[in-house]
Amino acid sequence: MESMFDPSHISRRLLLQLAGTLAAASALPLVTVRTARATPAMLASAIRNLVGEAHVQVGKVRLDIPPLVENGNTVPMTVSVDHPMTADNCVKSIHIFNEKNPQPNIANFYLTPSAGRAQVTTRIRLADTQKVVAIAKLSDGSFWSVSVDVIVTLAACTEELP
Amino acid sequence: MPAALVNVPAKAKRGAVIEIKTLMSHVMEPGYRHTAAGEVVPRDIITSFTCRFNGAEIFRADLFPAIAANPFLSFFTTASESGRFEFEWIGDNGFVATASAAIIVE
């Protein structure tokens, strides 16, 4: 009996069908995983929503996160801005973003000149190894940023409940 | 029953920059998790935190699902006069919690 998979008998149609099935099978899980994740494009649009057309300069902001995180469910994070806090020259707000959590936002902090020091500490969740971005808005309307790469070994947010 | 933990120095010198630490017990359910049956667990997070000193807002934060459970926040303020700090947490499903702390400035 002749085998259907004898190379000399593979028709063009069969080959195309096979290729199509393989492509669909490999693309499907990729697609379903991606829908639950923010993308670098969502990060960019979230930042665009904040700064508008303004140019974001790199510097002034400092983001302290452990570079290697074992548990993404609680990651200590300190953001500080090297800038004076006086009545007419201060840090207005600090915004934290991420690249691959389901949502690009992490937190917004609104400061007043009475803060004395532009520094905030909190604990965040990270769903994947990714980039965390902090952007500070100053009273003169300029934006300053820093981005830090964090490696996460146990992801947060999307796991099943027991 | 929400439980807040607030750490403010009881006394400070005038003009000193002091650190305020707050911790609120809350599950911060992000709304992206599934039960074993496949149902999405609805979001239940604290969305806003405000700190006022003698009635004036000195610090505010918008929180998102990416904030860890039992949100911890620490920030700074300048001790200008004696008075009272008031803290307020607002969240999903009508969650509201408050706390306060007094400071003596010499």
Image: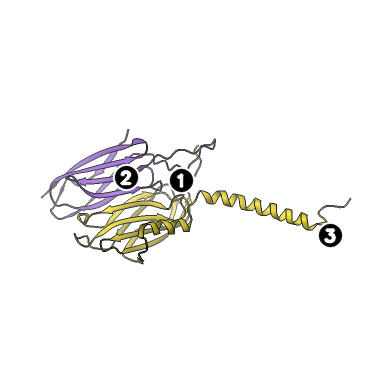
Chain colours: A yellow, B purple
Amino acid type at mark 1? Cys
Q: Is residue B101 above or below residue B17?
A: above
Query: Circles 1 and 3: CB distance less than 8 Å?
Result: no
Q: Residue A108 in the image: state x and y as whole percent.
A: 33, 52
Q: Residue A82 in the image: state x and y as whole percent.
A: 28, 63
Q: Report the disc number at residue A157.
A: 1
Q: CA distance from mark 3 to mark 2?
A: 68 Å
Q: Is residue A148 above or below residue B19?
A: below
Q: Nearer the viewer, mark 1 or mark 3?
A: 3
* x 80%, y 57%: residue: A11
* x 35%, y 64%: residue: A54
Q: Chain of mark 2?
A: B
The answer to whether residue B11 is visible is yes
Q: Report the disc number at residue B48.
A: 2
Q: CA distance from mark 1 to mark 3?
A: 51 Å
- Location of residue B47 (image quadrant): top left
Q: Chain of mark 1?
A: A
Same chain, marks 1 and 2?
A: no
Q: Residue A92 in the image: state x and y as whole percent.
A: 27, 57
Amino acid type at mark 3? Ser
Q: Which element type, helix, strand or loop, lies under badge 1?
A: loop
